[in-house]
Image (cartoon, rainbow, N blue to C red):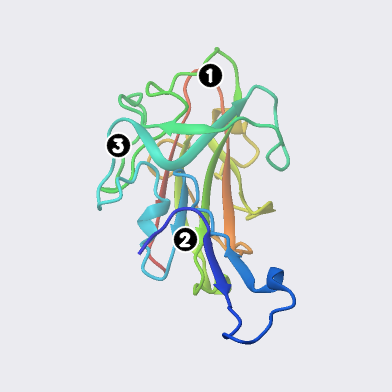
Amino acid sequence: STFSGNLVNTATVTAPVGSPDSNAANNSATDTDTQFPLPPGNVATISCVSGGALFNTAYDGAGGRKTSGTDNYWQVALTTTPITGAPPAGLTYAAAPIVTAPPPSYIVSPYGNANWISHAANAIHPTNVNYDIFYRFQFNIAPGVDPSTMALNMQFYADNSVYEVWVNGNAQGVHSNYGAADPYFYSGFTAGNQADGTLNGPWLSGLNEIVVHIKSGAAAQAFLAQVLPPA
């Protein structure tokens, strides 16, 4: 069952007939239980029965993928400032739109339950310059789930490259295989150039955050993520 607001219980006692009560002001007591706040709509909850597909980009929540609208959970922020370390504070995140007409050079999503997302449905940069883009997925690990047992084996396509993946502020060492080349112009959106890796956390009871840092040269950017079955 569900309820809204706080749960307040008040107990009151009355002196028996014929028994004097020298202080009637202390005959009741109140206890208030504050309701655990529900997460915002864009924060997922992972329980013992949650499927890994929840982490996929453009997952529709019913076994398939969205082809329009916005992602249920993934959010995006972008900057023209080159970033080489942790995601900067002060970024403004918004729900990531589904890419409705990906550039023809993009691999067609090989997954039935994931699709391309971006900052805009057409995936075109706001201006014709390089961008650093941050895709964020926030979720709560529900009580009863041991965070130490969690590991996410994931695959990422990106225009242009995955520069780093962060879990709760910890770098996971997952990135595209651009080597000594310019990550702003790697073809991470084509078959065989995806980034693969396992996200090991550390995960926390309660709120967690995954941030995928993308580097993208003009003139488009997008991101495609898929959870893979355990090896």
Residue at 33%, 30% (x, y): give it.
69
Q: Earlier in the sequence, mark 1 or mark 3?
A: 3
Residue at 56%, 73% (x, y): give it.
11
Q: Taking 139 as reference, is 122 left or right? A: left
Q: Is residue 205 visible?
A: no
Q: Quadrant of residue 85?
A: top right
- The residue that mark 1 highlights is 218
**How crowded is the residue under tag 3: few (<14 C-alpha within 10 Å), some, or many (20+)?**
some
Q: Which mark is residue 93?
A: none
Name the front one of labels 3 and 2.
2
Disc 3 element: loop
Work out how far the residue at label 2 is from the one at label 1, CA to CA, in angstroms.
30 Å
**How crowded is the residue under tag 2: few (<14 C-alpha within 10 Å), some, or many (20+)?**
some
- The residue that mark 3 highlights is 108
Q: Is residue 230 above or below residue 132?
A: below
Q: Quadrant of residue 54?
A: bottom left
Q: Earlier in the sequence, mark 3 or mark 2?
A: 3
Disc 1 element: loop
**How crowded is the residue under tag 1: few (<14 C-alpha within 10 Å), some, or many (20+)?**
some
Work out how far the residue at label 1 is from the one at label 3, CA to CA, in angstroms.
20 Å
Quadrant that contains the C terminus: bottom left
- The residue that mark 2 highlights is 153
Tell me, yes or no, whether the two marked residues, 1 and 3, touch with CB atoms within 8 Å. Answer: no
Q: Position of residue 176 (x, y in %)?
A: 55, 44
Disc 2 element: strand
Residue at 55%, 12% (x, y): give it.
127
Extreme residue in the front direction: 18
| Amino acid, disc 2 | Asn
| Amino acid, disc 3 | Val
Foreground pick, 119 / 144: 144
